[in-house]
Amino acid sequence: MAAAKWAHLSHSVLETIFSFLDLTDLRSSSLVCKHWYKLLTDENNDVWRMHCIRKLAEEALKSDLLSSAPTYKAKLRAFFHAWDPNECSRNIYIKPNGFTLHRNPVAQSTDAAKGKIGFRTGRHCWEVWWEGPLGTVAVIGIATKKAPVQCTGYVALLGSNSESWGWNLVDNHLLHNGDSQGNYPQLNNAPKYEVSCMFQHFNFHVCILYIITMVNRLNTYEST
């Protein structure tokens, strides 16, 4: 009898109940029955809207930062794959919106930040918007948990050892194990970063998709 009552609850009531569950419980709930699965796969309903409101800063929801994320669930997914304030150099500050980082101008220091979620297998891509000059060394790429997030001097921290691969935006070189692996991307007239009055939009999907898969890799940023 109880099961039958749950099965006949309206969408609005279920959405209200589900909006108070954490993500792990929501995943489990989606496996209970087809009705719940269909409701929770709707990425724009009140379940995901309420989770967005609770997790994401109002600034992030109203800005252009998430303009490419078309649904509430997609915006929430982006937040959980954004920068990790606990996995970055002490010279880097993650802003309250959760998606923007700022490096304090500390001399003779290379600083990095990692994402919240790592991966063991598969192909994954991120979009990075870089505003302002690159500095002496500017590298984006992937790394394991063991990769350092800070070192002394101005060096290409990403790609400096076997724990990471890096794309140096200054000279378009692919770096790994302390050596250049050649030009990247391997295209005629490869795009170069140019500073203008507007922020430069840098898209490095290709870099992430085709660099060799590494165990527990993380999206990573560094700048000096």
Image (cartoon, rainbow, N blue to C red):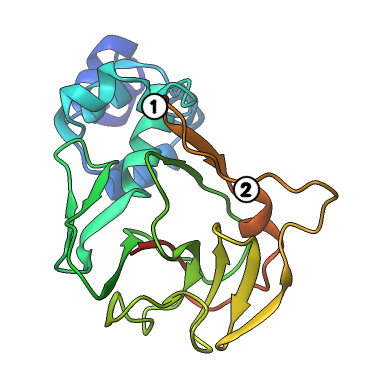
Q: Which residue is mark 1?
A: 66
Q: Position of residue 213 (x, y in %)?
A: 64, 72
Hey, which quadrant is residue 65 in on the image?
Answer: top left
Left or right side of 202 for 48: left
Name the residue tied to disc 2. Answer: 205
Mark 2 falls on what kind of element? Answer: helix
**Which residue is found at the position 53% from the left and 72% from the top?**
120
- Answer left or right for 195 relative to 47: right
Label 2 to label 1, Cα distance in Å? 17 Å
Which of these two is toward me, 66 or 50?
66
Circle 2 packing at 10 Å, graded few (<14), some (14-19), many (20+), is few
Looking at the image, can residue 108 be seen?
Answer: yes
- The first of marks 2 and 1 along the sequence is 1
Frontmost residue, 73 versus 153: 153
> 193 above or below 89?
above
Residue 10 shows in the view: no
Residue under the point 37% across and 21% down? 64
Q: 20 left or right of 146?
A: left
